[in-house]
Image (tube, rainbow, N blue to C red):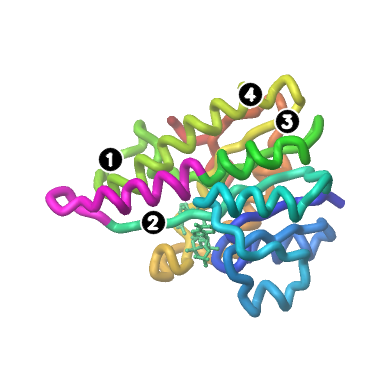
Amino acid sequence: MQTILVTGANKGIGLQLTTQLKERGDNVIAVCRTASPELLKLGPRVIDGIDVGSAGSIEGLKQALGDQHLDVIINNAGILRGDAFGSLNYDEMLEQYSINTLGPLRVTEALVDNLKEGSKVAIVSSRVGSIEDNGSGGYYGYRASKTAVNQIGTNLKIELAPRGIAVVLLHPGLVATEMTGGQGVTPAESARGLIARIDAACMENSGSFWHAEGYELPW
Ligand SMILES: NC(=O)c1ccc[n+]([C@@H]2O[C@H](COP(=O)([O-])OP(=O)(O)OC[C@H]3O[C@@H](n4cnc5c(N)ncnc54)[C@H](OP(=O)(O)O)[C@@H]3O)[C@@H](O)[C@H]2O)c1
């Protein structure tokens, strides 16, 4: 049994990660802004009121956890704001940077002492953050926030290597959640793949970027 902290656990991919990890017997700490009835029904330990864009909130998370050891942090919380060249909303671009890029960094930095040798940090990024894979453009703010979190993940790989902590960057696929308006594979299918990739993460492959389906993605 591992102790696994999941952010954005109240719905979508995060709720499915929580469901499946709990089903297999892990001790899940479900972090969210507002707990949903579905999450409460699952019965994990819930720490709510946590906005990953707020330093004060992350301090609250650190306090709530105390010296609780974590085997895995899954940085899943994220937002997508549509945009179009010609009418770009720069405030929304900064908002996406704050949540999608700095959120995983804030959480990992605050909780680093809860990790120990053998622990893992997973970041749910997106393949749209891949520069090499960008053949369709658009989504300026979202893409750039995910490209930047890939760089943060690479830095964390280097930062955390001396402590024996592995980092993995993940693309969940196109998944039918609120974020996509219900297009894509089921959150359950995506979560199964993400959990398999996190299970396979180790010091030897630390810092690599994986599709939930099991193949490595280009940067
Ligand atoms: N769905 C896809 O096809 C897809 C593809 C590639 C990557 N992703 C990534 O997968 C992750 C999960 O997305 P999803 O599809 O499950 O989307 P979702 O259903 O919209 O869920 C997003 C989750 O993030 C949380 N969140 C948003 N802003 C937050 C904040 N400031 N503080 C704390 N939590 C916050 C949401 O909480 P609230 O309910 O409080 O807003 C929710 O729990 C995201 O990082 C997303 O970028 C998704």
Element assignment for label 4: helix
The reply to whether callout 3 and callout 4 are in contact (CB within 8 Å) is no
Residue pointed to by mark 2: 80
User: Of 177 and 149, which appears nearest the observer?
Assistant: 149
Q: Which residues are magenta?
A: 83-102
Give whichever of discs 3 and 1 has the lower sequence position. 1
Of the residues shown, which amino acid type is indicated by label 1? Gly
The CA distance from mark 1 to mark 2 is 19 Å
Of the residues shown, which amino acid type is indicated by label 2? Leu
- Main SS of the magenta part reads helix
Task: Check disc 1: other Cα within 10 Å, few if <14, some if 14-19, many if 20+.
Answer: few
User: Of 202 and 112, which appears nearest the observer?
Assistant: 112
The CA distance from mark 3 to mark 1 is 34 Å
Element assignment for label 2: loop
The CA distance from mark 3 to mark 2 is 29 Å
Residue pointed to by mark 3: 165
Residue pointed to by mark 1: 135
Give whichever of discs 4 and 1 has the lower sequence position. 1
Please give the name of the residue rendered at 76% of the width and 36% of the height, measured from the top-left corner.
113
The residue at label 3 has a CB less than 8 Å from ligand 1 = no
The CA distance from mark 4 to mark 1 is 32 Å
Task: Check disc 3: other Cα within 10 Å, few if <14, some if 14-19, many if 20+.
Answer: many
The reply to whether callout 3 and callout 2 are in contact (CB within 8 Å) is no
Nearer mark to the viewer, of 4 and 1: 4
The CA distance from mark 2 to mark 4 is 28 Å
Please give the name of the residue rendered at 26% of the width and 45% of the height, measured from the top-left corner.
136
Residue pointed to by mark 4: 159
User: Of 108 and 201, which appears nearest the observer?
Assistant: 108
